[in-house]
Image (cartoon, rainbow, N blue to C red):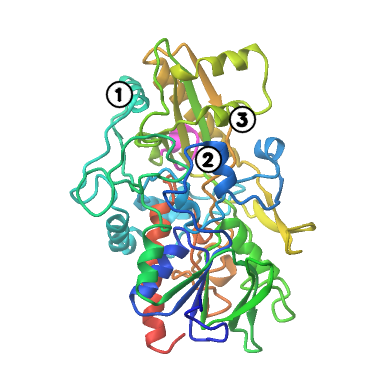
Amino acid sequence: MTAPFELSDDSVVVVIGTGAGGGVLANELAQKGVSVVALEAGGRHLPEDYLNDEWASFGQLAWLDPRTTSGDWRVSQDFAGLPAWIVKAVGGATTHWAGASLRFQEHEWKAATTYGNVQGASLLDWPIDAAEMDPWYTKAEEKLLVTRTGDRPGLPGNNNYKVFEAGAKAIGYEGVSTGRMAIQSTPDGEYNMCQQIGFCFQGCKMGAKWSSAYRDIPEGEATGNLEVRENAQVARILHNDAGKVTGVEYHDADGNLQMQKARVVCVAGNSFESPRMLLNSASSMFPDGLANSSGQVGRNYMRHMTASVYAVFDQPVRMWRGTTMAGIVTDESRHDPSRGFVGGYELETLSLGLPFMAAFLDPGAWGREFTSALDLYENMAGMWIVGEDMPQETNRVTLNHDVKDQHGLPVVNVHFDDHPNDIAMRDHAYAQGQAIYDAVGATRTFPTPPYPSTHNLGTNRMSEKAQDGVVNKWGQTHDIENLFISDGSQFTTGAAENPTLTIVALAIRQADHLASEMSKGNL
């Protein structure tokens, strides 16, 4: 099939990545009549292809290229080659996510101002705020059909939720519900309703959970303004003598190096691959990598303060049945330094299949205590802890020149150390999570260490001043006017909420700005 856009066409916007940022941006631009070439490192998998099997799905969707890891986080000991579960497929992480869709709270946009001087943290206020983001959040909620927004009802609670709710209310929590989820909760509309079949992290077989893979990408392609090139792994971004980007080199499905010219380039490869592309694009004009005059590319990596609590009960719970994460306690998401830390956290229902439970409950453990827990899997309930971790300049993504990918390019090393605030928050959350389950008769509880992360943020952060970050309030790099960042790597701080809704809202907003600037001839 002849590509709709020639490699030599320098009028197109090249979007690198097709997840919550890139996939939405590509569609939004295409709907506005902008010509877009989207480069996706992975292949295309649709609901009929998804596998309700954790191990098989991992092999199908995960980014399995080598990475290295350092720092004091548990992941560096147990999963050094897998610091995060990142998807390599059309749709990116929107094919592998729970659907939780939460707005940032007002104070979280101004973390530096709100929290004050936190020793060792590189806190910064976002150059945008809740009022500015409100209309974009509303657009994002409508796009994702988020439950408990508009007139959409919440999802029903499964057994895992019922245990969670009863325990939370027993210890005095009030903000307990099945949450705001990007999952179709009614039979109305053009999409399938959730059928509560479980195991729905790894691709929704019903297509009831929003994903750019089967919603935004096909919608954009239908306009005739979007071409998606699958299995196209970007090597570097090119620029001219004036310092403007001019195109993108990528390896196609056959391993051949291609070059697509571009009017604008938008990078949406996630918080590992996006800085990697900028750093691998170093030149004599940009010896430290593109858009890196501040030295901030790759720095301030955040993954949320994260952990889990599981509990065993006398009777079966069968937590794997029904929606994976339709359950939330919001009471601890407030900022209340009297608890011994700044910022807050959410508690959310979670279940893992038995294979992943064996891997993640206590990595490396064995013996009767461990196996007896797995024997009681049917009687388990589980929750995830997700909170605001502190940005630190030393938590960063760098190139590891000693390890190369299949195309001969340096892979990333991901360095992460917990901040004392992260540890204090996690300890508080462990205690509260155990208290929830103890209140409804748990016979054993298991505080579980953080898994390889799925919330990867920062590394190209947004800042008012060029010296403090990589991009401005529009995601436009401070150094290069026609180079944008369009994913979670632009997050200034992480807040306590799951990030997808904010990534989508920022992408819709960026598309509006980009199209306007292009029409004015400013880009």
303 lies left or right of 152: right
Cα separation, mark 2 vs mark 3, equals: 20 Å
Cα separation, mark 1 vs mark 2, equals: 24 Å
23 lies left or right of 59: left
**Residue 85 appearing in the image:** no
Indicate which disc residue 359 carries.
3
User: How would you rate the neighbour count of disc 2 (Cα within 10 Å): few for under 14, some for 14-19, many for 20 or more?
Assistant: many
Residue indicated by mark 2: 305
* SS state under label 3: helix
Q: Residue at x 61, y 16 (%)?
A: 371
Q: Residue at x 58, y 77 (%)?
A: 479
Q: Is residue 477 above or below residue 399?
A: below
Residue 398 in the image: state x and y as whole percent.
70, 58
Residue indicated by mark 1: 169
Residue 348 in the image: state x and y as whole percent.
40, 35
Tell me, yes or no, whether the highlighted magenta stretch contains residue 416.
no
Q: Quadrant of residue 349?
A: top left
